[in-house]
Amino acid sequence: MKARSRVAIVFATALAVAVGLVSAPPAAGSMAGSDRPQRNPLCEVSVQRIADLWGAMETWAGAQKESGDAVAEAMSQMLGSSDPSDLEVLEMQKEVAQDDLKRVRDFQAREMQADLSELLRLSGQLRSSVPRKHHSYVKARVAKIRSLYKEHWSGVFASTFISAYQALTGADIQGWASLTEPLPAKVTLAHDAFDQSFRGLPKLC
């Protein structure tokens, strides 16, 4: 996906800058009279990327809900009509639902798995940027976030959207509505669970 490629480029650039900042000697006199702790840019970049991965999934879930709702609304205006042009539009909307179904399946199989792999890499990267005494904490926190990612996004949300889009391919707009209506509230629950596991990580930087 082009958007993810751009994110990866930005992340790589930020990471390179962070590494440069860590290795570069401080400017003369920059620490004189200062008792403030040194920032840890590499740690900050890693932690921000974890937050961005989760935030991207919240955005994805909202976009899928809006897209499917639009298809369902368009279908509702054609159901029961015998007008050939209305029936043609209805078939077109079924094809849109079929395309969306394929995209969600592909996203679950590829992009979500890539995110889970990246979280593993970020766990190691973050541990390398903080003192050893924090390593177990970081490993446990990121492992929990990965678990929440699999449970909520790959599990509940992707699976629900797959079932809901399958309903739309048969013009079952009630099926779509009943399956997806609980999802906005579940986004909030997922966010709260993520925040509980994530909130301590920025403090390490």
Image (spheres, rainbow, N blue to C red):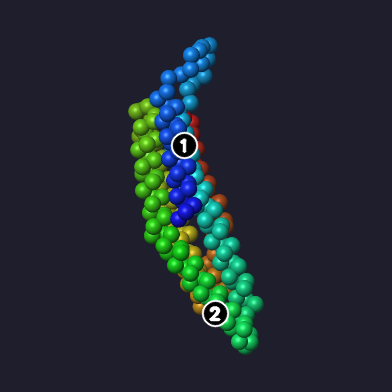
Can the viewer see residue 32 in this picture?
Answer: yes
Please tell me whether mark 1 or mark 2 is closer to you in this view: 1
Q: Residue 90 appears in which quarter of the rendering?
A: bottom right
- 141 or 8: which is nearer to us? 8
Position of 118 with respect to 97 (left or right) is left
Residue 60 spot, x, y in % from top left: 52, 56
Residue at image position (42%, 23%) is 24
Mark 2, residue position:
91
SS of the residue under disc 2:
helix
Above or below for 70 versus 141? below
Position of 81 with respect to 47 (left or right) is right
- 51 or 200: which is nearer to us? 51
- 179 or 37: which is nearer to us? 37
Residue 2 spot, x, y in % from top left: 47, 54
Above or below for 36 versus 155? above
Q: Name which residue type carries label 2.
A: Glu
Position of 39 with respect to 143 (left or right) is right
Q: Name which residue type carries label 1.
A: Ala
Q: Residues within 10 Å of mark 1 (few under 14, many from 20)?
A: some
Residue at image position (38%, 54%) is 113
Dot 1 or dot 2: first in sequence order is 1
Can the viewer see residue 172 in this picture?
Answer: no
Q: Residue 25 appears in which quarter of the rendering?
A: top left
Q: Residue 109 appears in which quarter of the rendering?
A: bottom left
SS of the residue under disc 1:
helix
Q: On the rendered image, what quadrant is the N terminus found in?
A: bottom left
Mark 1, residue position:
14
Residue at image position (34%, 28%) is 132
Above or below for 192 versus 135? below
Gap between marks 1 and 2, in whole Å?
A: 46 Å
Residue 75 badge: none
